[in-house]
Amino acid sequence: MSDPARIHDLLIVGGGINGAGIARDAAGRGLAVALCEKGDIAGATSWASSKLIHGGLRYLEHYDFRLVRESLQEREILLRIAPHLTHPLRFVMPHSSTSRPAWLIGLGLWLYDHLGGAKTLPPSAAVAFADSPYGAPLQAACRNGHVYSDVQTNDARLTIENVRDAAHHGASILPRTRLLSARRENGIWVCTLRTADALVFDMRFRAIANAAGPWAARMHTLLGGREDIGIQLVRGSHIVVPRLYAGDHAYTLQNDDGRIVFLLPFHDNFTLIGTTEVRVRDPDELPAASTEEVAYLCRATNRYLRNPIRPQDAVWTFAGVRPLLDDGKENLSQVSREYRFVLDQPRTGDAPLLTIIGGKLTTYRRLAEKALDRLAPTFPKMAPAWTAQALLPDRMIDSGADPGCDFGGGLCERDVRYFIEQEWAHDADDIMWRRTKAGLSMNRKQRDEFTLWLERNR
């Protein structure tokens, strides 16, 4: 698998968005990088988000000004370097009897418009729904509101394109490969890894970046980290229903419990609704939207829409686990989305272990830069930061090639082979729900037939 005597620079544990960002940045700075991920790339939290690049408007209520400023600045950078993965949206926020006062919302939106500095998106504005198509799906009691700008993305593809670019810059990508153990030996990490095929091998590294997300605390302990890692695991669930309204805009709905629920246009014919916040204990428990969460999202939506939705209207549900900082707050809506680094290096000259806690999709690129800043003493010849200006790649499928089998939902054999050969896809879900959302437009028979075809032809 690898020359056991060769010493690489950096092992990144975790193929979510933070690990992908670190791998891309580090490989582009000239480091010898490997990334291992026990499952699929973007196969956990990083494909199950609300799929937004946003400043976090509600974080202003908790005085997280630094995080909002950084998020808004990163929103601008991602619009520039990933135009194929970012789509500006206007968000409509109706007022209700239980909403924050209109003047306070207006003030918050003014701050949201200006906190990040220069920006390319339209500013916020007040809106009267009687004279606007934004009011068409809303109940008559919703007379006024505000509109503001944020950005929608494809979270899984954003992660995968970062990993592809890391590989382009020389990184070794090891999906479905677990880090079993590691020990420090003469200033080097000696790491034992195992593939899904039960192949066990050793690799040597000068440093480890633990970006294992929900499993970061467990990995930190496995690697002998001395400091306790404070992580709260919070499940966020979403539902997808047939499209609820015309127009390419989103809604930000303030629920009566103080939480925010988004209605988002999703793949032309659908509306994505989310999210919930439920504390979980075990990162290995497969996250799934509960009956209670689906009902909660329907109730929150029905407080505003003329035509109510029912749980049985959901054509798809999904859930992911967010690894948040454990700041002692019981109200999960108030838990910070900040990130934190824990550097474990018992003695001068020891190989460092850097554990990443928290973070959000929007800030992954800046998090990666800061992570490498923390590791800079180990890599004095590392090149400077570069990702703020460099375009992310787009997938390069040869549209002129024979498409082969048509599996439905816009998915064909040519594309499937590309995802397997170029993007590390392995299982049917990797392709139907992460590399694409073809599963939404396929019926059950088509999904079953594709799964069987893939098992026979992989």
Image (spheres, rainbow, N blue to C red):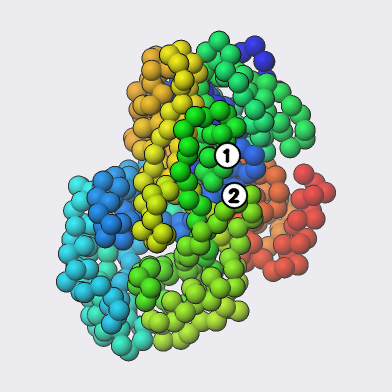
- Residue 193: which numbered mark, if any? none
Q: Residue at x 64, y 62 (%)?
A: 439
Can residue 360 be seen in this snapshot?
Answer: no
Q: Position of residue 114 (x, y in %)?
A: 18, 53
Q: Is residue 424 above or below residue 376?
A: below
Q: Hey, what amino acid is under mark 1?
A: Arg
Q: Nearer the viewer, residue 114 or 82?
A: 114
Q: Residue at x 43, y 14 (%)?
A: 348
Q: Position of residue 76 (x, y in %)?
A: 30, 47
Residue 330 image-quadrant placement: bottom left
Q: Position of residue 16 (x, y in %)?
A: 53, 43
Q: Nearer the viewer, residue 184 or 424?
A: 184
Residue 102 lies left or right of residue 323; in this view the side is: left
Toward the bottom, the furthest residue is: 140
User: Which residue is disc 2 drawn over?
Assistant: 283
The mark that comes first in sequence, 2 or 1, is 1
- Circles 2, 1 touching at the beta carbon (< 8 Å): yes
Residue 89 lies left or right of residue 233; in this view the side is: left
Q: Residue at x 63, y 44 (%)?
A: 40
Q: Position of residue 184 (x, y in %)?
A: 57, 18
Toward the right, the furthest residue is: 456
Q: Is residue 314 above or below residue 29?
A: below
What secondary structure is marked by label 2? Answer: loop
User: Which residue is disc 1 drawn over?
Assistant: 218
Q: How many marks?
A: 2
C-alpha distance separating marks 2 and 1: 9 Å
